[in-house]
Amino acid sequence: MKKNKVKLYAMIWGEMSIESRDIVKLHADYATFSDPLQLVRTVIDTHRFTRTTTVAAISKRDGREQYASTTMGFYESLPSFKERFDAAYEVYTESGNATIPTEDRAIDFIGKLTKAKYAEFQAWIENSLASKTITGLTLELAYRFASEFKPHVNAQPPRLKAVFNVHAGETKKQDNNNSSNVKCWGCGKVGHTLRACPKQRLPGL
């Protein structure tokens, strides 16, 4: 459990901007931080939504974008995500957007859970709503159902691999499934590797 907390803390910290980190570091208890939930709460408290524009349409747009972009991290706990989701919805409404119907907000919450762990739960909810086994779904009820569900323990986080850029002389991370930016060392064309090059077949490849 402690190991997972360390991973989650590191993941949240890694996703924060330099500016956000500097703000959090100013917190009186920053030196004692170790719990990821404590970090999330501090981020919320120090990043409370304030309107930076007098243009209502822009303010509403920013609120919608923040709500839409709030999704559960792979190592994030359910209580931590629920807290962030509630904060994002608060931003959404405070920026002038109309309140979202109760069931729609519950569906939004369920859809934002990480699919690697909660795909089975999401399918169960969808089937239960379609068959009317569940009616009057609320956010609190969705959260309770999700809390009682056992996430897929063998789920794997998105796989990344290190790719050395010989021209820039640096290492960067690249999605294993994305070959659109890969350059073939054989023919020099982009879109495939040397192993898959149609013009060259080296021994053993």
Image: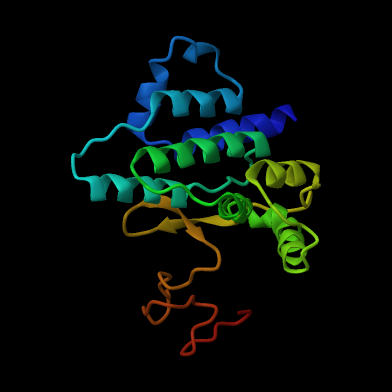
Left/right of residue 202 with respect to residue 191 in the rendered view: right
In this orientation, which residue lies closer to the viewer: 63 or 198?
63
Q: Quadrant of residue 116?
A: bottom right
Residue at left offset 43%, top offset 75%: 184
Left/right of residue 19 with respect to residue 203 in the rendered view: left
Q: How is the image coloured?
A: rainbow
Q: Quadrant of residue 135?
A: bottom right
* Residue lying at the far top of the rendered structure: 28
Residue 189 position in % (x across, y down)? 37, 80
Q: Is residue 43 above or below residue 187?
A: above
* Residue lying at the far bottom of the rendered structure: 199
Q: Is residue 9 above or below residue 97?
A: above
Numbered disc total: 0
* Residue lying at the far front of the rendered structure: 136
In this orientation, which residue lies closer to the viewer: 44 or 26?
44
Residue 137 position in % (x across, y down)? 68, 51
Residue at left offset 36%, top offset 45%: 63
* Residue lying at the far left of the rendered structure: 54
* Position of the N terminus by quadrant: top right
Left/right of residue 133 with respect to residue 92 in the rendered view: right
Residue at left offset 53%, top offset 81%: 196
* Position of the C terminus by quadrant: bottom right
Residue 10 position in % (x across, y down)? 55, 33
Residue at left offset 72%, top offset 27%: 2
Residue 174 position in % (x across, y down)? 48, 59
In this orientation, which residue lies closer to the viewer: 63 or 21?
63
Q: Is residue 58 above or below residue 19?
A: below
